[in-house]
Image (tube, grey):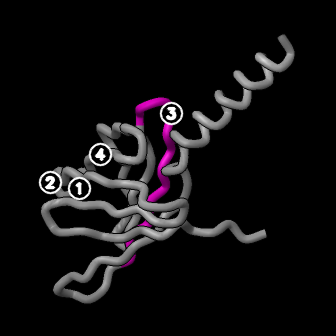
Amino acid sequence: MKHLIAVLLLFGCLSTYAQTGIDGDWKGTRETPNGTMEINYTFKVEGTTLTGIWKTQFGERKIENGKVDGKKFSYTVSFNEMTINNTGELVSDDEIVTKNERGEMKLARVKKEN
């Protein structure tokens, strides 16, 4: 019985870890007519819901309508009376690729300083 409980706990922990690889701080850049713009994200996954913050030098906005399905996710960001639909995929522990009508962007996980 103890072994069964231990296996179930281990499976539960691994399932939770697999679903939360998107969590954390991420950084990418996008080329614009005015030069390179840095974009930072903070993602938080709870079940199949994705929340977080999108931040640039122009300010920050909440991520809306976020959904997670395994390593794939979607969300919207609204600013200046525009809403941009985004999709993304966790490629590795340290890389996410996001896509929207403006193109594709690679995000790198921001490492925590000790």
Q: Residues within 10 Å of mark 2 (few under 14, many from 20)?
A: few
Q: Residue at x 34, y 37 (%)?
A: 67
Is disc 3 placed on a helix, strand or loop? Answer: strand
> What amino acid is labelled 1 in the image?
Phe
Is disc 2 placed on a helix, strand or loop? Answer: strand
Q: How far from the left and from the top, in percent, is residue 107?
A: 42, 68
Q: How far from the left and from the top, in percent, is residue 102?
A: 16, 67
Q: Of callouts 4 and 2, which one flags the residue occurring earlier in the amino acid sequence?
A: 4
The numbered mark at residue 79 is 1
> What amino acid is labelled 2 in the image?
Met
Q: Which residue is mark 2?
A: 82
Q: How far from the left and from the top, in percent, is residue 52?
A: 45, 47
**Horizontal placement of 72 versus 103: left or right?**
right
Which quadrant of the figure has residue 49? top left
Q: Residue at x 16, y 86 (%)?
A: 33
Task: Give the main secondary structure of the magenta stretch.
Answer: strand
Q: How many angstroms separate mark 4 from mark 3 (CA)? A: 14 Å
Pointer 1 and pointer 4: residues touching (CB < 8 Å)?
Answer: no
Q: Of callouts 4 and 3, which one flags the residue occurring earlier in the amino acid sequence?
A: 3
The numbered mark at residue 13 is none
Q: Which residue is mark 4?
A: 74
User: Is residue 53 on the magenta stretch?
Assistant: no
Q: How many marks?
A: 4
Identify the residue at the far bottom of this view: 35
Foreground: disc 2 or disc 3: 3
Foreground: disc 4 or disc 2: 4
The numbered mark at residue 46 is 3
Q: Residues within 10 Å of mark 3 (few under 14, many from 20)?
A: few
Residue extent of the magenta highlight: 38-49
